Image (cartoon, rainbow, N blue to C red):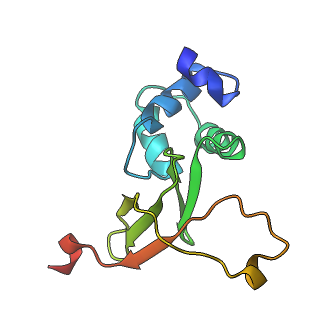
Amino acid sequence: MEKYRRFNIKLTPQRIAIFDYLEGNKNHPSAEDIYKAVKKQFSTMSFATVYNTLEALREKGNVRELKIDEHKKRYDPDMSPHHHVICTKCNVIHDVFSDIGVHLPDEVSKGFDISGKSIEFFGVCRKCKY
């Protein structure tokens, strides 16, 4: 419980279960995925609790929201600088930690204080390809 105080969000048993599910999760789960997993522990928990917790985490910079398709948001608890490669058939998402040398030309970035970058590559994964 102490390790989650850094999130600066009121801690409840349901929120702690959501944090536990996210911690170290490399699957980039959706709110629905998290809800299904955590509801096993808290049968009376609502989907709104999961969604609102994810929103609070996102607003405080503790989780990254990925809008991979127009129907579903996915969440990435790894806030270190990285990018993603996404399969357009099965929607699996893999992290890419290599630095990708993208530099905005001065005329494009003029007047902006760039705070980060995120690049998504789309394609068909090896599993779906064969």
Q: Position of 70 compared to 21: left or right?
A: right
Q: Position of residue 48 (x, y in %)?
A: 64, 42
Residue occupying the point 80% across, 69% down: 112
Residue occupying the point 39% across, 42% down: 25
Q: Position of residue 17 (x, y in %)?
A: 49, 27
- Pick the quarter of the image with the C terminus: bottom left
Q: Position of 128 compared to 46: left or right?
A: left
Q: Position of residue 109 (x, y in %)?
A: 75, 76
- Is residue 6 placed above or below 79 in the rendered structure? above
User: Which of these two is toward me, 51 or 75?
Assistant: 75
Q: Residue furthest top?
A: 2
- Pick the quarter of the image with the N terminus: top right
- Is residue 34 placed above or below 81 in the rendered structure? above
Residue occupying the point 44% across, 35% down: 23
Residue 1 showing in the rendered view: no
Residue occupying the point 45% across, 63% down: 99
Residue 59 showing in the rendered view: yes
- Is residue 88 placed above or below 47 in the rendered structure? below
Numbered marks: total: 0
Q: Position of residue 22 (x, y in %)?
A: 46, 38
Query: Where on the picture, by quarter, is residue 53?
Result: top right
Q: Residue furthest front?
A: 106
User: Which of these two is toward me, 34 or 95?
Assistant: 95
Q: Residue furthest left?
A: 130
